[in-house]
Image (cartoon, helix red, strand yellow):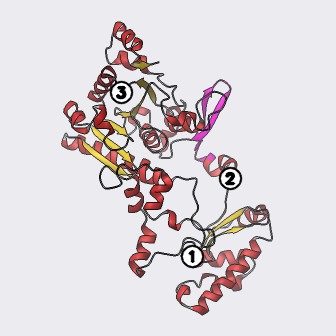
Amino acid sequence: MGKAHLPLSGMTVLDLSRLLPGPLCSMHLVEMGARVIKVEDTGMGDYARTLGAQKGSASPMFQLLNRNKESISVDLTKPEGLEIVLKLVEQSDVVLESFRPGVMDKLGLGYDKLKSINPKIVVCAISGFGQTGPWALKAGHDMNYCATSGLLDQVGSAESGPVLSNFQIADIAGGALSAAMAIVAGLLGAERQGEGCYLDISMTDCAFANNMIPMSYFNATGKSPRRGQDLLTGGVPCYRLYETQDGRHMAVGSLELKFRQQVCEILGQPEWAAAYGDFMGAATNPEKLQKTKTIEKEVEDLFKSQPQSHWRELFADSDCCVTPILNMQEVFEHPQLLAREMIQELNVTANDKVLGPAPAIKYGAQSVDAEKILNEQAGPDQGEHTLAILRELSFGQDQIDQLTEKRVVKF
């Protein structure tokens, strides 16, 4: 399967977004076959270029998020710059942006304007709190959206209080993935109905809408679940993280009876099996709760008596949902990911490489080679494709020279 056969082949996305949620969304669209043109200003461009950058090159984060995209650098505050983008809208299928509400209208790129130029255009706006409501114009970051949607209250242990994850839940699940899903639906609707749509993606809304377990608990009890003390956050010994002797951890997820029994046998404590899994109703039954806490302490002590390597070896051939918690170096070396050809090298410069993921969605057994080719190009330099895109839009050399002289565009 070549790129021409990927689902979004032939589709063009204008990506005006920056940092993480929007660029991650358009990265997934690239992996589905779309052409993504990254529209950057003529100043510093996407802020992600400098986040953690070393050796004068763009940051690894930028390279990973923007691989295989094109970059045009244009000043949207100038009429000539706006004209360039509107010409691109004519031949595009999607416009993706992450400005605060109202900014696109101020720039002359509001939905009504874009729709009048291209009735089938799908416009997707990713924002923290949505385009409407009393908080629409509030600034925020992932932690603020997680806090507002109830997610952050549930992350952490009963002793620690809330903790921050290095996986930006609202940015990624609420922003990037929700937007990508909505865009694909919008494109399908445009093809079937001949008319595009406007997508209002609030990262807070989408994080809230996916917060199912705490929401279910609240509906059942009328109360918020206690952090670190329910079924899936460490409240039972058979679904917990256990520290090992060397300060590392094992993830034990043996909820089902057959898995719990196997874990206890491997640990050499088959008599634990009944109490180890006797968690139903423990929160309201003092006797059950005491049993659970006793077993929990014994399991803690046992795991802490040996280094992680011991437990990795002991559980290596088991099938009971027990795995080591890996660091990123170990992840890049994991045989499962290597077998799936999920690890790729991006050639940033002659002497600089960035390790990253191959496309995670596989479109049939024959698609791997095409996907590897698709993903080899690192993130573009700012304005790297400006000249080629202007020529594609039929701008003559004299016009290009004038735009350059007026600093409307940047190469």
Give, as a three-letter code, the residue at label 2: Asn
Q: Which residue is mark 3?
A: 76
Query: Tag 1 or tag 2, which sits nearer the N-term?
Result: 1
Q: Quadrant of residue 228?
A: bottom right
Give, as a three-letter code, the residue at label 3: Leu
> With respect to residue 74, does 401 lie above or below?
above
Give, as a three-letter code, the residue at label 1: Gln
Q: Nearer the viewer, mark 3 or mark 1?
A: 3
Task: Calculate the distance from the C-alpha at mark 2 to the C-alpha at mark 3.
Answer: 42 Å
Asked if the residues shown at circle 2 and circle 1 are in contact, with their CB atoms under 8 angstroms apart, the answer is no
Q: Quadrant of residue 398?
A: top left
Task: Calculate the distance from the C-alpha at mark 2 to the C-alpha at mark 1.
Answer: 26 Å
Q: Which residue is mark 1?
A: 229
**Left or right of 321 on screen, residue 120:** left
Judge whether residue 372 can be spotted in this image.
Answer: no
Q: Nearer the viewer, mark 2 or mark 1?
A: 1
Badge 2 local density, few (<14 within 10 Å), some, or many (20+)?
few
